[in-house]
Image: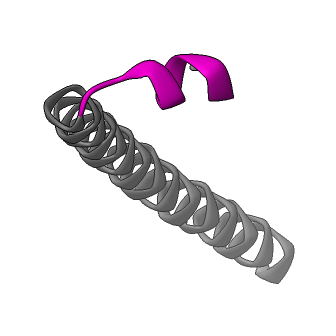
Amino acid sequence: MTTVEELQSMTHEDLVRRVQELEQDLKEVKEQSDMWLDSFTRLQARHESSINALDNIVKLTKMK
């Protein structure tokens, strides 16, 4: 984290470079977040499918 004093002492070029670094960091964090959300969604769908399969097995065994 950059302090106000550090930011105020930076040149315009330094500030532009810092903004570019922050934009790149933000992009990387968003990509990771999207990856984790996709992974979570797929796992959640698998979990629901497993529950439905087990529910159907229980229903079939009760029919006999």
Image coordinates for residue 29, horizontal then vertical, percent: 38, 39
| The residue stretch that appears in magenta | 4-11
Residue 7 sits inside the magenta stretch = yes
Residue closest to the eye, 21 or 63: 21
Image coordinates for residue 14, horizontal then vertical, percent: 22, 26
Could you tell me if residue 52 is visible in this image? yes
Residue closest to the eye, 27 or 4: 4
Above or below for 1 versus 48? above
Above or below for 27 versus 18? below
Q: Seen in the image, is 1 located left or right of residue 27?
A: right
Q: Please tell me in which quadrant of the rendered image residue 32 appears.
A: top left
Q: Seen in the image, is 23 located left or right of residue 2?
A: left
Could you tell me if residue 1 is visible in this image? no
Image coordinates for residue 45, horizontal then vertical, percent: 50, 65
Q: Seen in the image, is 49 located left or right of residue 15?
A: right
Which residue appears at 22% of the width and 38% of the height?
A: 12
Which residue appears at 58% of the width and 66% of the height?
A: 53
Image coordinates for residue 52, horizontal then vertical, percent: 64, 72
Above or below for 14 versus 25? above
Q: Residue furthest right?
A: 62
